[in-house]
């Protein structure tokens, strides 16, 4: 099967649970035999983005992309703008492999000096918890990379390799042009996707 076909979603898929089961099966096969994290994150962003695009559950092609951005922000062990490193480091999250329109290159982990808030990705990264935003307009701190985005979900990405960061290495971020797109089924499915990636990658 050509690699691109792995992002085709069969019409028989009726629920989000079935959708994520299908994506996980395809993703596991795509990543088999490769542990380089850049390669695997790029492939993950591509299959997720195009699977949402082709699924009636998320609007399908007729309505344009509902999921308009899908990708990773990463927290490398060091950054040229900062002399700090390790667990106490507060250098920003940096844009990683993604699908969608161009986005913010970096996201600060420190609160905004005026509002006192951090963005959605930083909230998820710092708390190590998934954050679902039903309406970005009502979420203090939300950083708008695209004015069309209405809702969002962010899932923390934790290294399972005790010899590498042994902690959060970044986040998986998805944006939608529709309010209330993401729910607990998306959280469960995307946390399974992230678990698969964590185990499938070497992070150093
Ligand atoms: N909305 C995110 C910024 C990243 S873009 O959505 C791609 C945030 O508030 O952290």
Image: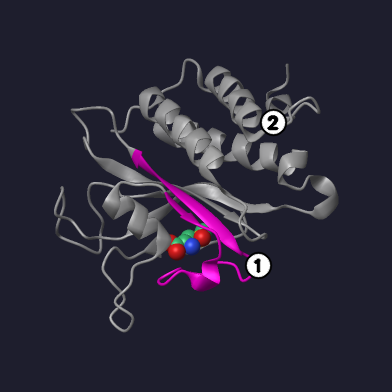
Residue 41 drawn above or below residue 199: below
Closer-to-camera residue (119/165): 119
> Is residue 90 among the parts visible in the rendering?
yes
Does 141 lie within the magenta span? yes
Query: Which badge, 2 or 1, is on the more N-terminal residue?
Result: 2
Q: Is residue 97 left or right of residue 19?
A: left
- Measuring from the top left, give residue 120's x and y in whole percent: 41, 60
Which segment did they paint magenta? 131-157
Q: Mark 1 falls on what kind of element?
A: loop
| Mark number, residue 7 | 2
Badge 2 density bin: few <14, some 14–19, many ≥20, Cα 10 Å? many
The number of discs equals 2
Q: Mark 2 falls on what kind of element?
A: helix
Closer-to-camera residue (1/23): 23
Q: Is residue 15 left or right of residue 87?
A: right
Q: Determine contact: label 2, label 1, CB under 8 Å.
A: no
Among the 4 quarters of the image, the one containing residue 175: bottom right
Does 150 lie within the magenta span? yes
Closer-to-camera residue (173/29): 173
| Ligand 1 has an atom within 8 Å of the beta carbon of the residue at disc 1 | no
Q: Residue furthest bottom?
A: 114
Residue at screen point 54% across, 72% down: 137
| Ligand 1 has an atom within 8 Å of the beta carbon of the residue at disc 2 | no
Closer-to-camera residue (70/62): 62
| Mark number, residue 148 | 1
Quadrant of the frame with the C terminus: top left
Among the 4 quarters of the image, the one containing residue 200: top left
Badge 1 density bin: few <14, some 14–19, many ≥20, Cα 10 Å? few
| Mark number, residue 55 | none
């Amino acid at each position: 099967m050509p690699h691109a076909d792995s992002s085709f979603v069969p019409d028989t898929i009726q629920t989000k649970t079935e959708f994520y089961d299908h994506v996980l099966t395809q993703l596991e096969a795509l990543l088999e035999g490769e542990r380089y994290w850049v390669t695997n994150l790029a492939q993950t962003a591509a299959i997720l983005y195009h699977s949402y695009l082709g699924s009636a559950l998320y609007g399908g092609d007729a309505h344009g992309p509902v999921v308009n951005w899908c990708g990773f922000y990463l927290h490398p062990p060091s950054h040229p703008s900062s002399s700090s490193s390790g667990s106490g480091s507060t250098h920003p999250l940096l844009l990683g492999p993604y699908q969608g329109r161009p986005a913010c290159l970096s996201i600060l982990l420190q609160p905004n000096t005026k509002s006192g808030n951090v963005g959605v990705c930083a909230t998820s990264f710092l708390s190590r918890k998934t954050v679902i935003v039903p309406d970005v307009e009502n979420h203090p701190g939300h950083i708008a990379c695209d004015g069309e985005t209405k809702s969002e979900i962010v899932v923390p990405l934790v290294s399972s390799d005790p010899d590498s960061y042994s902690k959060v290495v970044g986040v998986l971020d998805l944006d939608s042009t529709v309010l209330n797109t993401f729910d607990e089924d998306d959280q469960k499915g995307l946390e399974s996707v992230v678990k698969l990636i964590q185990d499938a990658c070497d992070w150093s």
